[in-house]
Amino acid sequence: MTHRMSSTRLEAPRTTRRALLWSLFAFSAFGGRARAESTREFRILVHPDNPAVALSRDFMTDVFLKRTTRWPDGETAHPVDQRASAGVRESFSEGVLRRSVSAVKRYWQQRIFSGRDLPPPELESDEAVVAYVLKHRGAIGYVSSGAKLGRAKAVSLQ
Amino acid sequence: MTRRLGRTRALRLGRWALCAASLLALPTQARAEDNADSSNPLPIEIHAFVSQGFIKTTSNNYLAENSTHGSFEFSEVGINFSKQLTDRMRVGIQLFTHDLGPLGNYRTRFDWFYLDYRFWDFFGLRAGRTKLPFGLYNENNDIDAARVPILLPQSVYPVSNRDFLLAQTGGEAYGIVPLASAGSLEYRLYGGAIFYDTADATSTLSNVRGPYIFGARLMWQAPLEGLQLGASAQRLRLDGDAVFSADQIAQLQMAGQLPADFSGPLKFHIPATLAVASVEYSAHDLLLASEYSRWWVSLNSTVPAFSVPETVSDRFYVMSAYHVTPWFTPGLYYSVLFPNVTDRKGQNPPSGSPPGTAPVGRGAYQHDLALTLRYDLNSFWLLKLEGHYMHGTAGVTSALNDNRPLSSLTEDWGVFLVKTTAYF
């Protein structure tokens, strides 16, 4: 009896631990699916003279975190963000950068105040992003899926 | 005299407060101008932060003179200006002032300034006063907004070392080397000198300087998104003079620690090698980090009695944080410090050490369990609450505790901190 009781006591934390782990995995899995779906909520656009038609998520991440500063043809990349509270920013951040907007802001706080780098400009609207992209050959931005792109070129995400 | 010092401090504070208040009005205007002129991809960027904290300990004065009664001597103000001159060249400067107990005292200094030329993504050069890339977070030691905890794990990032281990004046080479499917490798190589503000030191120290520091950091961004592993090492030396009063000299001569013909000052050199291995996983809302560090430090002096043979210390922490919502992030870490790896319990101080220099008893370890609650009240204002359960007194300063030996201070104690930061 004593033995059974102690083994039950030993099992209880293990069960709790397992439940916690499963919850974590389930949360990650559902979170990942929700985020993957959110990638449909934005479109990526570049200057019409940019030869790119599809971009990998890794390249996009490197450009928006400024680990890569150039396009493959040598043109300087000018990523442009939307304001932190914009829904499209959240979709882009989770879907492409695989980080929350808060985590990305923290990344930039680290770099700004340690003198390492500066974040991409944050524009107020889809229209401002389209205008920015049309003005700079190396620009890359994202807008809501229903936004008017004008002459800007939409590229797909690989 | 005290009143005059108080007035000077108040004037400094007032000046900074005025400066900060006027600067806090700037960001909206600056951003609006940037947006209006979106044709300029290379604007001047101005960023600043103002922090005020409060520290209270259940016993043992820690970081501030009077922390057992609660202390507001925990303030930081910084402002930086950066300009991308060309696609490849950038300049920047940051002014910083702070007060943390006996440190800082609102003396304004250049935190960093640099000229940066990025030839390619895999090679760039930076010259000026640059922050030291040591471990994951050394560069962010004074950037409250960039992290969850108020105090980074003090075993690896002691705030008392901030003034001489945060930045160097010299040069740095850096770059990111893509490794195809194996991720990428970020490297930083640097060398220069350290300027030490003697005003922060005890009255017996003068002319403290760091004639050299050099080091490297390698961080491997693994193919698994958000995972990075790294190693950092640095070698440095601090030189200085210890100046004793006539009474102190007489006492030390009577104790046989100074030769009879000693006329001072006592010159010392502190060569040190610091190394740290790091791992961080940051994906979506989760942050996990852990670092193990080892420091080799010795003290060579013109008077043998004041020399300390090389001491090796162990430092380790594991940390996690999770963005529950965009405005709420709790964080937790456990950190441990052993100032002398050969005597982790403080029971066998090494023979040959000058009296009072070897950690003894509870002064030979520090276990620190910390819980932080970070509230992002809006995008430029945050509030943090933090509690620490401490076991051991390594890392505590005797000078803040009436020069009592660390082994006589309270072994189990708590630290509570509140800090608010405005930044843009």
Image: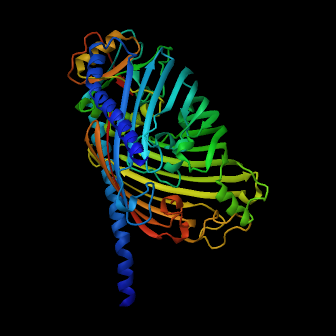
Position of residue A96 in the picture relative to residue A41 (left or right)? right
Along the line of sight, which residue is nearer the eye, A68 or B94?
B94
How far across and down, in percent of the image, does residue A35 sit?
30, 39
- Which quarter of the picture shows residue A148? top left
Left or right, A81 with respect to B211, comes to: left
Asked if residue B22 is positioned above or below residue B399 in the image, the reply reads above
B28 relative to B167, above or below: above
Q: Looking at the image, what colour scheme do you see?
A: rainbow
Residue B59: x %, y % from top left: 41, 66
Residue at x 79%, y 55% (from the top left corner): B261
Who is closer to the viewer here, B398 or A114?
Answer: B398
Query: In front here: B377 or B101?
Result: B101
Residue A99 in view (yes/no): no
Front one among A57 and B408:
B408
Question: Does residue B190 lie above or below B334 as drawn?
Answer: above
Q: Position of residue A50 (x, y in %)?
A: 40, 12
The residue at the point 53 percent across, 56 percent down is B316
Query: What is the x, y in percent for residue B338?
Result: 58, 62
Is residue B235 shown to the viewer in this render?
yes
Residue at (73%, 68%) from the top-left corner?
B351
Picture quarter containing residue B106? Answer: top left
Given the current orientation, which residue lies at the most extreme bottom position? A1
Quadrant position of the C terminus of chain B in the picture = top left
Using the rendered view, name the quadrant where residue B217 is placed: top right
Q: Residue at x 33, y 61 (%)?
A: A20
